[in-house]
Image (spheres, coloured by chain):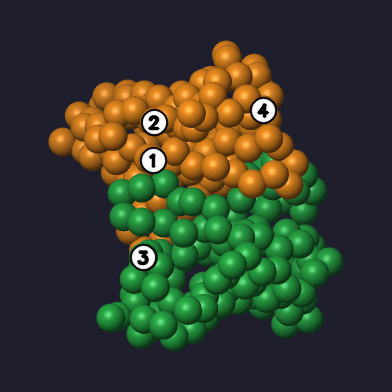
């Protein structure tokens, strides 16, 4: 059973507007979340992370929000640019301990398409 | 220039053949990981190693084997027991703990 879920396989957003990618999780013991960006035929690149002791983390155009009571996090990209077109994966540590040393569990990804 | 290299970029396997995917890192990371990605799917953990000469099975280890004889290297062998090996294979490394995992460029394995 998937512990990290991204229910939108794709999302189309106009250039310059806000992109909001969503992620839900089932394990309340998760204490750390990561977002990765992936282009076709390449490895994922780390984008931004958030610890469960925070509800927001910002890095330039990218902001991740965490709602622990709803077991939900979202990635906001403002403003969206053509180079943001990629698949975005939400991830969490695979085990309740180790903080990710035991690997990560990933959602299925959301394909973001930025339209000119 | 530090990073993770995977070779080859494409690999073809014949029925009943074992093939080995290479992963090397010069980031001085203790932990290394192998993931598999199928179309429309997220990444699934195959094997991981937190230290030299030690490794653990991930969620989908059946049909795969690994070794960790050197800190820099974590090769993955896809054995003939893996009935559906066609996928994109990704190697990653991290400093351990909550440190971010960094990924290599991937190897696409195809069955002839």
Count neighbours of disc 1 (C-alpha within 10 A) and say few if under 14, some if 14 to 19, many if 20 or more.
Answer: many
- Numbered disc 3: what chain? A
Q: Secondary structure at mark 3?
A: helix
Give the alpha-carbon distance from disc 1 to disc 4, as whole Å: 19 Å
Q: What residue is shown with label 3? A: A83
Q: Are marks 2 and 3 in contact (CB under 8 Å)?
A: no
Of the two numbered discs 1 and 4 on the same chain, state the one appearing first in sequence: 4
Closest to the camera, between mark 3 and mark 4, is 3
Q: What residue is shown with label 1? A: B105
Q: What residue is shown with label 2? A: B6
Q: Are marks 2 and 3 on the same chain?
A: no
Rendered location of residue B95, percent (x, y): 68, 35
Q: Are marks 2 and 1 in contact (CB under 8 Å)?
A: yes
Q: What residue is shown with label 4? A: B30
Q: Colour of chain B?
A: orange
Give the alpha-carbon distance from disc 3 to disc 1, as whole Å: 18 Å
* Picture layout, residue A53 above or below residue B109: below
Q: Left of B3 or right of it: where is B112?
A: left
Q: Quadrant of the N terminus of chain A?
A: bottom right
Q: Colour of chain A?
A: green
**Occupied quadrant, residue A27:** bottom right
At 68% from the left and 53% from the top, the residue drawn is: A93
At 34% from the left and 76% from the top, the residue drawn is: A114
């Amino acid at each position: 059973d998937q512990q990290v879920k991204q229910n939108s396989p794709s999302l189309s957003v106009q250039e310059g507007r806000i992109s909001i990618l969503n992620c839900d999780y089932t394990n309340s013991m998760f204490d750390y979340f990561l977002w990765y960006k992936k282009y076709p035929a390449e490895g994922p690149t780390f984008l931004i992370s958030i610890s469960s002791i925070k509800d927001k983390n910002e890095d330039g155009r990218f902001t991740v929000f965490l709602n622990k009571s709803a077991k939900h996090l979202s990635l906001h990209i403002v403003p969206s640019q053509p180079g943001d077109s990629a698949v975005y994966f939400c991830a969490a540590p695979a085990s309740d301990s180790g903080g990710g040393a035991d690997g990560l569990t990933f959602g299925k990804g959301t394909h973001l398409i930025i339209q000119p | 220039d530090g990073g993770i290299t995977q070779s080859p970029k494409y690999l073809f396997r014949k029925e009943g053949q074992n093939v080995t995917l290479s992963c090397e890192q010069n980031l001085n990371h203790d932990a290394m990981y192998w993931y598999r990605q199928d179309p429309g799917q997220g990444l699934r953990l195959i094997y991981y190693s937190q230290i030299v000469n030690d490794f653990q099975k991930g969620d989908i280890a059946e049909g795969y084997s690994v070794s960790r004889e050197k800190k820099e290297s974590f090769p993955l062998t896809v054995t003939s027991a893996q009935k559906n090996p066609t996928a994109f294979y990704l190697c990653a490394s991290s400093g351990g703990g909550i440190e971010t995992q960094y990924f290599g460029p991937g190897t696409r394995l195809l069955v002839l």
